[in-house]
Image: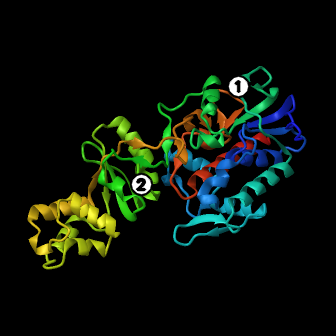
Amino acid sequence: MSSAPPCPPELADVAIVGAGAAGLMAGIWAGRGSAGRRIVLLDGARRPGAKILVSGGGRCNVTHDQVDASAYAGSSPHAIGKVLRRFDACRTAAFFSEIGVPLVREEETGKLFPASGRARSVLEALLKAAKEAGAELFPPCRVESVTRTAEGFVLAGQFGLLRARRVVLATGGKSLPETGSDGHGFAIARSLGLALTERVFPALVPLTLPPGHFLRALTGVSAPALLELWSGAGKRLAAASGAVLCAHFGLSGPAVLDISRHVNEARHRDAKATLTANWLPGTPPAELDRALRPLGAERPLAFLRGRLPERLARALCEHAGVHVAAPGSQLTRAARAALVRAVTRLPLPISGDRGFRYAEVTAGGVPLSEIRLQTMEARACPGLHLCGEICDVDGKIGGYNFQWAWASGYTAGVSLSH
């Protein structure tokens, strides 16, 4: 017969709501500098850290070897950079090595993974470091509300009431809700007087195409591409390069995930915004046009098949109205122009995204303008600190969102030790 989980104490110096990457980091650094103070970590999941375990295909992409504010969106680059510099990628690598998880660099991408190749080693090391620092973990203890009092805060949930002098909100956003990040932290922040961005929406999320779009029939086909997002007025708003994966619902893959938050934002603000794909990245339309002209007896399909997956090459020819068996000499100027457009600037009529259930991160949240960046303390609510995905900061694929968690969690944690 299993015993009931331990209940948190009725009184604590610091209560950290959420024991994911940012919350554990805050707990570690608050504990290391706060001997004798009681620090508790409350998490609604029976086994905290689920996002760490599922990240990077179970390997956990801890960070990237080159991190700066240009890899992020949301709040201002200046504000994001100020926090990132407090605990950069070099310090992150040193910290993880110190707690027994040396990192190795993936040469092709610059991503840093644990040498063990196991995300679980990252989580176990963080949990151990938090315990050694004196932070006490109490799962499952979902915090339903946080109320400001003259002495500090009262946290309430099925576990009862907990009074704390200071509180850290590290609840995450709304992405991957089955891991416990269901957006409730935003409601708590709002109840304590903090503003949120106008919208909170999925980022690093697969995008959908309308039923019947020809790319949806190419499930499993992957190819490098340059994706470009254009405003209705023709201004390039964003771009992303990398693999694009065709799927039964539309598009996924690193390039799609990276540009997805910009697509979602543009579709909200500009009904005429469009996304295009160049399936020969690095090849401008004029260059492809010149290459197609002297084909002679060679078929355009054969030409493209040497550069693209067979199924994609065939589908692009058919989409452009080019007969796959016809030799290049039979290409009319109009047909050649249509094929060039299909290959180098194919319009992708995005109909939506797969939602928070499939999103790796949340765009939007508490703007950094609401927070004192030296301490991650809320300007409107002294004693309340925020870190991680609850903030209006979202990064590209490649360990950038974890780096934000480590940096913001460290900044909050160190400030709590004073």
Residue under label 2? 247
Residue under label 1? 145
- Residue 190: horizontal and vertical position, in percent? 60, 26
Left or right of 4 on screen, residue 171: left
- Residue 261: horizontal and vertical position, in percent? 44, 45
Residue at 22% of width from left, 61% of height from top? 318
| Residue positioned most to the front | 1
Task: Give amino acid for label 1.
Answer: Ser
**Earlier residue among tags 1 and 2:** 1
Q: Is residue 172 above or below residue 276?
A: above
Q: Are marks 1 and 2 in contact (CB under 8 Å)?
A: no
Badge 1 density bin: few <14, some 14–19, many ≥20, Cα 10 Å: some
Task: Confirm whether residue 14 shows in the render.
Answer: yes
Left or right of 225 on screen, residue 286: left
SS at mark 1 in the image = strand
Residue at 61% of width from left, 50% of height from top? 404
Left or right of 359 on screen, residue 226: left
